[in-house]
Image (cartoon, helix red, strand yellow):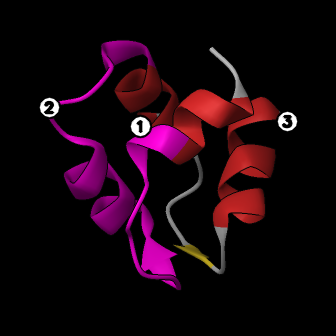
Amino acid sequence: MSPIDIQKALKGIEYPASKEQLLEHAKGGDKEVLDALQKIEDREYEGPSGVSAAVFD
């Protein structure tokens, strides 16, 4: 899984977005992406780079 996979799963989401909104938007997609998003900190994310940083830190 790469940052590109995360961004594809979240394509079209409006930021800022909460962890819950990210999970809801990615639901039905790649299980590996969903598992990664479930592990990120429960806070609001300002954009795609923040989500990627949280997943790959």
Q: Nearer the viewer, residue 11 or 23?
A: 11
Q: Label 3: state its secondary structure.
A: loop
From this view, report whether residue 19 is shown above or below residue 31: below
Q: Crowdedness of circle 2 by 10 Å Cα count: few (<14), some, many (20+)?
A: few
| Dot label at residue 57 | 3
Residue at the location (72% across, 46% down)?
52
Q: Mark 1 is on which residue type? A: Gln
On-image quarter of the C terminus: top right
Magenta span covers which residues? 8-32
Q: Mark 2 is on which residue type? A: Gly
The residue wearing badge 2 is: 28
Q: Nearer the viewer, mark 2 or mark 1?
A: 2
| Dot label at residue 38 | 1
Residue 54: x %, y % from top left? 73, 48
Asked whether 21 falls inside the magenta stretch, the response is yes
Figure disc tally = 3
